[in-house]
Each structure stands twice: as C-alpha cells, then as structure tokens.
Amino acid sequence: MFQSSSIVVKILIQKLMNVSKFIILFMLILSSLIAISCDSASDKGAYDKTPKMRAALAEKGSVHGKGGIIVTGTSSIELEPDMATLSLGIESSASTVSEARDNASISINEMLDVMKNVGIDDEDIQTTAFNIYPQYEYIEVRDDNGRVRGVQELVGFTVSNMLMVTVKNLDDIGGIIDKITDAGGNDVRFNSINFGIQDPIPYQSQLRKLAVDDGITKASQLAEYSGVKLGSITMITDYSSQASIAQDKAVFAERAMAIPSTSINPGSLNLSMQVDMIFEIEN
C-alpha cells in the first residue's frame, strides 16, 4: 500500500514539474514578444520625439539606429545695452504701523514724482514687494521669584515698499539714480542695477545663422581629422527660444561699486545662442 502511494506521489510531482516548465517557457516567450513590440514602437516613434528627447538620443549616438557626427554650434554678438533695471525702494520704521506707513508713503511718492520728471513711464515702474513687520528688542526682566529671564518687547514697526524700475535713457543714468535716491532720503534702499537689451528678438536670425555656420565648421573639421566624408545634416535642434543675455562680470562689479556716485558704466552685453546638429558619415 505504501509503495502504491509513493508511486502516485512521484507521478504528481513529475506532472507539477512539467507544468512549471511550461509556465516558465510561456513567460519567457511573452517577455520576448513584449520587448520586440516596444523596440518597434520606439523606432516608429523616433521622429515624433520632442527636440530635447531627440537630442538625448543623439548624445547616445543612436539616432534612428545610425551613427554620425554630432556637434554643438554656438554664436555670440556683443552689444551696448539700451536699458537698465533698478531694484530699489523705501524702508521706514516708526513706533506705530500708521506712522511707519505714512512716512514710507511720503518717501515713495517723492521718488515716483522724480521718476516721472526724468521721463520714466508708469508702465516701467512695478511694485515688487510691500511688507509690514514688527520690530522687537530683547530685554531682561526679573520675575516675582527674583529670577532673570529674557523676553521680546515690541518697539515699533517697519514698512517696506520695493520697486522694479526700467530706465530706457542711459545717457545720464548716474544722474537719474542720484535724483531718485535723493528723493527717498534716509529711508531709500538700493539693491541692484542690471543692464539689458529692450528687444533681443531682431538679433535671433543673425545668431541662429552664426550658430549653424559654427556647427558646419566644427563638423567639417571633425570629418577631415578623422578621415571620413561628411554627409548631409539629419537633425538640427534649436534650444534657444530667444537669445540669452550674458553680462561681463568684471564690468558688472565695477558698475555695482559705482552706484553711490554719478559714474555708471553700462559696459557691454553678449547675446548668445546654440544649436545641436547631426551629420551623416558617407560611405
């Protein structure tokens, strides 16, 4: 009887093993079919990728399954700035909120009047921050048990009103800054000055052409140095929706130091752009 049971158990185990092998084989076949399907979908949709995704494929050297020469073309134009952006405002402190707010209002209105007198339009003046916050002093007091402890005592309030002002007349930018800050008196706060180009869009076409020319030159050199023949362009990616503005840091530091005086040096700015390009290698 025990021998018969043992034989039955062996038969069951053998069948289970056969079923397990079948399941494993089925899963392997299914995984292979899914992988092939994904690869086909990926190749089919390669042309539908966004420029940045196509550029990522290019960086891996596998654009549409082909190799090539990949370069980045850059361009830059040096220009004189035609505008300045001032970050400045008023910070006034008093024992009460109303007094601090009134003092700040008087000072900011004086500054606004000067801005209009020097030709700054209302649309070029923007409030960037308005804050009212308390001021405390740390004092020591003695409680009924004779122990000394520190407490905060409210001593007043501060009202801050900050502006972003665009100045389009740089002929006397130093004098304009002096007049505005003088109007604010001791409550004035001057944070920064930045120079820029009012409308960089007209320069985009020139920058783009220079960037493409630079990319073609680089690709031609790479082909020559590596002993291959340069083919046609298969892809161009323009990362720049508009030209970026870069300031000369050394000049900017000089300008920042010159803010308290009437000598302001706008210096120069660089508009730049870059494009990624892929070229075929001809056989």
Image (cartoon, rainbow, N blue to C red):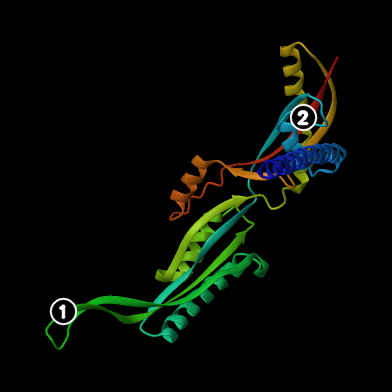
The crowd level at tag 1 (other Cα within 10 Å; few <14, some 14-19, many 20+) is few
User: Where is 97 relative to 113, above or below?
Assistant: below
Q: Quadrant of residue 261?
A: bottom left
64 or 144: which is nearer to us?
A: 64
**x and y, in percent, of residue 61 in the image:** 74, 28
Image-quadrant location for residue 34? top right
37 or 93, which is in the foreground? 37
The image quarter containing residue 8 is: top right
Tag 1, which secondary structure? strand
Q: Amino acid at mark 2?
A: Ser
- Marks 1 and 2, the one that precedes in the sequence: 2
Which residue is located at x 63 percent, y 47 percent?
81
Q: Which mark is residue 245?
A: none
Q: Residues within 10 Å of mark 2 (few under 14, many from 20)?
A: few
Please indicate, yes or no, whether residue 90 appears anywhere in the rendered image.
yes
Q: Position of residue 55 (x, y in %)?
A: 74, 37
Q: Position of residue 145 (x, y in %)?
A: 13, 86
Task: Report the Cα–Cα distance between label 1 and label 2.
Answer: 74 Å
Tell me if residue 238 can be seen: no
Quadrant into which the C terminus falls? top right
Query: Mark 2 = which residue?
Result: 62
Residue type, label 1: Val
Total numbered labels placed on residues in the image: 2
Give the residue displayed 36% in from the left and 77% down from the top: 135
- In this rendering, position of residue 232 left or right of residue 98: right
206 to 88, vertically: above or below: above
Q: Which tag is nearer the camera, tag 1 or tag 2?
A: 2
Give the residue number, with chain letter if any, for mark 1. 148
